[in-house]
Image (spheres, rainbow, N blue to C red):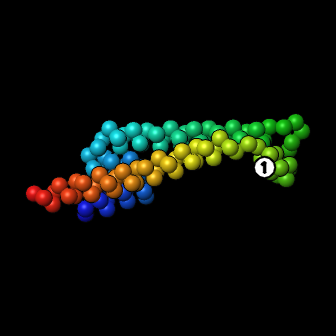
């Protein structure tokens, strides 16, 4: 399969950075994979903090789901949205870069 097709599909649907690795741009691919991993871990930590804050309250019984839901809705999700936005930008960059690099590689292979 042509790299211009395989690499962006891999970055888009498997994991960002895989397309760069397929295109043999290992450093860039590893950096994108690391960025994806860091953003994922940061989002999990922030989500845990939000859930913990919603569950921590004086005199809240875990069976009182309405009160827990109200506290959950009152939490600040802005940092989580920034992390999601950063991931979306990294994902988009990964797909576009993999496609462009794949087209260059396919063009060079076609010249031979």
Visible residue check, residue 81: yes
The quarter of the rendered structure image containing the C terminus is bottom left
Report how many numbered discs are placed on residues in the image: 1
Residue 47 in the image: x percent, y percent?
65, 43
Residue 102's spot in the image, x, y percent? 28, 55
| Residue 72, image x, y percentages | 77, 47
| Residue shown at the point (86%, 49%) measured from the top left | 67
Residue farthest left in this picture = 112
Q: What residue appears at the point 76 percent right and 38 percent down from the top-left corner?
A: 53
Judge whether residue 11 can be spotted in this image. no
For residue 25, side relative to residue 11 (left or right): left
Determine the secondary structure under disc 1: helix
In the figure, is residue 68 to the left or right of 29?
right
Nearer the observer, 15 or 87 = 87
Q: Residue 9 vs residue 51: left or right? A: left
Quadrant showing the N terminus: bottom left
Position of residue 39 in the picture relative to residue 30 (left or right): right
Q: Where 49 falls versus 24 (above or below)?
A: above
Which residue sits at x=45%, y=53%? 92
Question: Mark 1: few, some, or many residues within 10 Å (few <14, many ≥20)?
Answer: few
Q: Which residue is found at the position 30% from the left and 41% from the top?
A: 26
Which quadrant holds residue 45? top right
Residue 62 image point, x, y percent: 82, 46
Q: Nearer the viewer, residue 60 or 2?
A: 2
> In the rendered image, which residue does mark 1 sit on?
73
């Amino acid at each position: 399969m042509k790299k211009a097709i395989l690499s962006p599909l891999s970055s888009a649907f498997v994991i960002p950075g895989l397309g760069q690795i397929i295109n043999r741009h290992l450093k860039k691919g590893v950096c994108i994979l690391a960025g994806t991993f860091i953003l994922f871990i940061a989002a999990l930590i922030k989500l845990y903090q939000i859930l913990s804050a919603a569950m921590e309250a004086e005199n809240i019984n875990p069976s009182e789901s309405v009160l827990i839901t109200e506290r959950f809705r009152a939490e600040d999700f802005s940092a989580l949205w920034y992390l999601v936005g950063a991931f979306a930008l990294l994902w988009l960059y990964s797909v576009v870069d993999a496609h462009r690099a794949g087209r260059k590689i396919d063009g060079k292979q076609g010249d031979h």
